[in-house]
Structures are given as structure tokens and as C-alpha cells.
Image: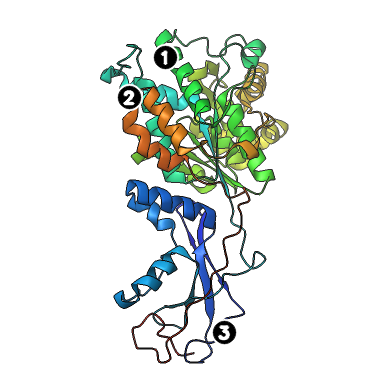
């Protein structure tokens, strides 16, 4: 038995406990140890819940009891919330039996989640969303509205995904390997406000001061960090959730990687998996690169194949699977999209556009992303101090709760052994130790 969140991440697990097969009456029962898949995270969550009164964090507790513990056992009830609890299940209400937790060999290893964030995408959204506020640092007069908006959005995404690791990628503004290969790349974009870049630099500095993993690869972009993070996570047996407002990452979707697309605020964010991509665009993730290469990307100044729009591209890929097969079999292409479109696809101009677009649009998978440093912010005190120093006190509690988790992969000292309390000689129905007949 397990409890999962909306992204399929295991929050709690129940495993059979072989040493507890009889209840207080001596009757045979099926006993489970129920607790969070990551007890360390639960303990940290409880600290934050107690400190900040955040009810949502309290959901990560051992409090998965189907029947509440009676008031007359207040002391034992308090101990249950602080120690692993066993539950007896036999088709009826569940009764807790306090006993030893399972050995490490019995406890299933949870699937961990890496959150990979498109820093440029979030920074631009924050800039436009908060520009009218004109928020400035009272001590220096410097604008900080984009810094505030970025962190508020990052905290919201972390709260939604509840990751075990976090990496934030940014474009390298000093150079572009893609522009070196095609000088028209993004040439249609106007000059950005110098203040946008100044606040983006402030964001990078803040994230690093908070102890978060920030990657700006030389000559590459945030998309390349996302692709490499997804590949690294998959190789380590992790899931990956990519947070971005762009469609460029749709080709990274796999069974273990999904894209949280941020559109019109976090409340309207859409989690895209393979099925959702087919539903919305009619192509699979492995066909996405060919699809966008055919139709082009106006925002990046990458024209598509003349005469091939989204509908024609979908028909072509549905029939042929990929562009290379369509080019190798003109008859199949003509049957799918018509003779005129198939002829346009076969021209030297079309082939050159396809080759250029696939080269420029391809996302790198080899940027170094170290999972061992993708953990939480350094310390709640550090987070609080850094935000207050930047005159962002209103974000302190939310940022601490969202960013200062205890990473599952870090070994912690074992908890002290727990001695079960002495059972009463005669259990009372409805009492803490009331049992369900086997």
C-alpha cells in the first residue's frame, strides 16, 4: 500500500511487519508499518509545520490513522505522532498497534524527483508580472520586483512538486554556440531592458547565496541544463519535472520526465506528459523535434519548411513516423499530405531548413548536473538572513518551508530504539488498542 502525490511520487508506504502477527487479544491479524517513504523529510516537515503553522506540511506525517486515538491515551497518542506506527487492517476500521519499525531491508526505497527549472523563463515571467509594482529596495533604491516575483514563483513550483533535488538553469549571455552556427538565431528579438538583466544577475546571486544549485553552461542555454538534468535523473533512477513556460522542452518528455508548463500563473500550470502532448499537438515526444523543425519557431527566428504548417506536419509524422522516413519514401509522404506538399518537402530549400532547425533546436544532454549538490537551501537561518538582507521579508516563511527540506539521499543517524508501552490487560472497544478480528 502506498500514498502518492499528483506526480506519482510516493509520500507514504505500508509494508508487512513479520514480527507482529497477533493483536492484543492474541488473534492473528495482518499488520503493516505505515509511515512516510522518507522519514527524514517527515521530521523536517514537522519542524516547519510547528514553526510556521503550515497545515499542508503536516500531511507528510505518520498521521495516517483511520481511527483517531482516544483522548484518554493522550500521552500515547503524542508518542504515535513522533514514532512509526503499525496499523491492523482486516476489511474494517484500522487500529494502530505500537511496535518496532521495519528493518532498512524491509522499507521500500522511494522514487526521488528532481525539479529542473528554466531560470530565464521564470525571470522573464516575473519581470512582466511585477513590473507595474515598481518594487524597490528601500535601502538602495534598486528595483527588486523581478527578484521578488522569481522567488515567489520558484517557491510556488517547489511547493507544488515537492522535489528531492532542485537545479536552476540560465542562458549564457556571454556567448551562443547556436548563434555561432546560424547568425540569424534570435536576431529578430529587440534589445532587452538593462534592468531586466541586472535583476536576473541579482536572482542568480541570491539563489547561490541560498545554497541552491545554479548552472549557466558556457555558450549554451537553460534548455540544455533542463535536458541534461532529465538525462542525469533518469540515469540515477529519479523522476524529473521540468518547470518552464516554453514549449522547447516537450521533446524531453519520457516515462520518467514530465514538463510543468507555466502559463498565466502557477494556478493554471499544466503538467505535460506523453499522453497530454499527443492530445494537444498530435505528436509524440520523440517526434517533437521533427515537428518543430518542420513548422519552425518564429520567436527564435527559425523559419520552417515553406508550405508545411502544423496540420500537415502532424499528418506527415502520423503516417511516416519521422522526417527521415518521409524523405526516403516520397510515395508515402505524398499519400499522407498530398503530392504538392511532398514535393515541397523534397526540395533543397526544405532539406536545408530542416537540417538547420534540427541542429539548432536540438537540446544538449551532457551539461554536468551533479545530483549530490541539488539538495535543499543550506539552512533556514541562512534563507531568512539572505531574504531579509535583500528586503524580501514577506517571502521568508514560504521560502523556508519550500526550500529547506531534508534530502532523502543524505544519511542520517538512526533514531533511538523505541520501547513499546505495556498493553492494558483488557482492551476496551474503541480504545487505542482495540483490535479487528482476524
Q: Residue at x 47, y 82 (%)?
A: 422
Residue 419, position in %: x, y?
53, 73
Say the numbered circle drawn on residue 129: 2
Tags 2 and 3 touching, CB below 8 Å: no
Coloring applied to the structure: rainbow
Instruction: Quadrant for residue 306, please give it.
Output: top right
Q: Residue at x 47, y 80 (%)?
A: 89
- Rounded to the nearest angstrom, the CA distance separating label 1 from label 2 is 12 Å
Q: Is residue 340 left or right of residue 434?
A: right
Where 68 sits versus 37, above or below?
below
Q: Mark 1 sits on what residue?
A: 196
Residue 60, position in %: x, y?
44, 56
Tags 1 and 3 touching, CB below 8 Å: no
The residue lying furthest to the right in this view is: 328
Q: Residue at x 49, y 86 (%)?
A: 23
Instruction: Quadrant for residue 293, please give it.
Output: top right
Viewer-side label of 1, 3: 3
Dot 1: within a 10 Å radius of its alpha carbon, few (fewer than 14), some, or many (20 or more) residues?
A: many
Residue 68, position in %: x, y?
34, 73
- Rounded to the nearest angstrom, the CA distance separating label 2 from label 3 is 58 Å
Q: Earlier in the sequence, mark 2 or mark 3?
A: 3
Q: Residue at x 33, y 17 (%)?
A: 137
Tags 1 and 2 touching, CB below 8 Å: no
Secondary structure under badge 2?
Answer: helix
The residue lying furthest to the left in this view is: 133
- Rounded to the nearest angstrom, the CA distance separating label 1 from label 3 is 64 Å
Q: Mark 3 sits on what residue?
A: 21
Amino acid at each position: 500500500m502506498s500514498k502518492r502525490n499528483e506526480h506519482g511520487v510516493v509520500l507514504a508506504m505500508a509494508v508487512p511487519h513479520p514480527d507482529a502477527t497477533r493483536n492484543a487479544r492474541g488473534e492473528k491479524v495482518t499488520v503493516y508499518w505505515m509511515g512516510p517513504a522518507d522519514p527524514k523529510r517527515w521530521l523536517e516537515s514537522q519542524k516547519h509545520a510547528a514553526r510556521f503553522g503550515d497545515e499542508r506540511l503536516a500531511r507528510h506525517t505518520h498521521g495516517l490513522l483511520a481511527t483517531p486515538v482516544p483522548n484518554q491515551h493522550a500521552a500515547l497518542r503524542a508518542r504515535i505522532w513522533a514514532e512509526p506506527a503499525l496499523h491492523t487492517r482486516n476489511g474494517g476500521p484500522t487500529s494502530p498497534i505500537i511496535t518496532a519499525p521495519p528493518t532498512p531491508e524491509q522499507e521500500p526505497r522511494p522514487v526521488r524527483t528532481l525539479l529542473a527549472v528554466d531560470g530565464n523563463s521564470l525571470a522573464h515571467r516575473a519581470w512582466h508580472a511585477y513590473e507595474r509594482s515598481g518594487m524597490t529596495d528601500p535601502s538602495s533604491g534598486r528595483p527588486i520586483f523581478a527578484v521578488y516575483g522569481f522567488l515567489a514563483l520558484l517557491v510556488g513550483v517547489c511547493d507544488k512538486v515537492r522535489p528531492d533535488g532542485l537545479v536552476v538553469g540560465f542562458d549564457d549571455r556571454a556567448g551562443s554556440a547556436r548563434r555561432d552556427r546560424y547568425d540569424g538565431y534570435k536576431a529578430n528579438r529587440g534589445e532587452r531592458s538593462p534592468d531586466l538583466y541586472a535583476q536576473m544577475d541579482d536572482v542568480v546571486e541570491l539563489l547561490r547565496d541560498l545554497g541552491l544549485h545554479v548552472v549557466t553552461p558556457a555558450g549554451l542555454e537553460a534548455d540544455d541544463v533542463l535536458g541534461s538534468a532529465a538525462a542525469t535523473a533518469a540515469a540515477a533512477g529519479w523522476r524529473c519535472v521540468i518547470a518552464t513556460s516554453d514549449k522547447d522542452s516537450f521533446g524531453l518528455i519520457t516515462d520518467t520526465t514530465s514538463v510543468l508548463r507555466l502559463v498565466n500563473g502557477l494556478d493554471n500550470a499544466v503538467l505535460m506528459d506523453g499522453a497530454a502532448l499527443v492530445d494537444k499537438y498530435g505528436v509524440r515526444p520523440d517526434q517533437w523535434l521533427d515537428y518543430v523543425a518542420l513548422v519552425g519557431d518564429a520567436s527564435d527566428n527559425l523559419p520552417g519548411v515553406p508550405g508545411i504548417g502544423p496540420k500537415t506536419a502532424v499528418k506527415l509524422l502520423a503516417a511516416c513516423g519521422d522526417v527521415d522516413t518521409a524523405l526516403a519514401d516520397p510515395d508515402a509522404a505524398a499519400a499522407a499530405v498530398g503530392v504538392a506538399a511532398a514535393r515541397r518537402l523534397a526540395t533543397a530549400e526544405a532539406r536545408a531548413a530542416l537540417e538547420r532547425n534540427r541542429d539548432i533546436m536540438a537540446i544538449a544532454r551532457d551539461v554536468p548536473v551533479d545530483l549530490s549538490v541539488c539538495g535543499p537551501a543550506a539552512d533556514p537561518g541562512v534563507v531568512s538572513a539572505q531574504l531579509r538582507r535583500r528586503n524580501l521579508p514577506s517571502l521568508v516563511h514560504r521560502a523556508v518551508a519550500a526550500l529547506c527540506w531534508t534530502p532523502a539521499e543524505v544519511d542520517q543517524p538512526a533514531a533511538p530504539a523505541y520501547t513499546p508501552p505495556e498493553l492494558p490487560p483488557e482492551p476496551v472497544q474503541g480504545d487505542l488498542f482495540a483490535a479487528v478480528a482476524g
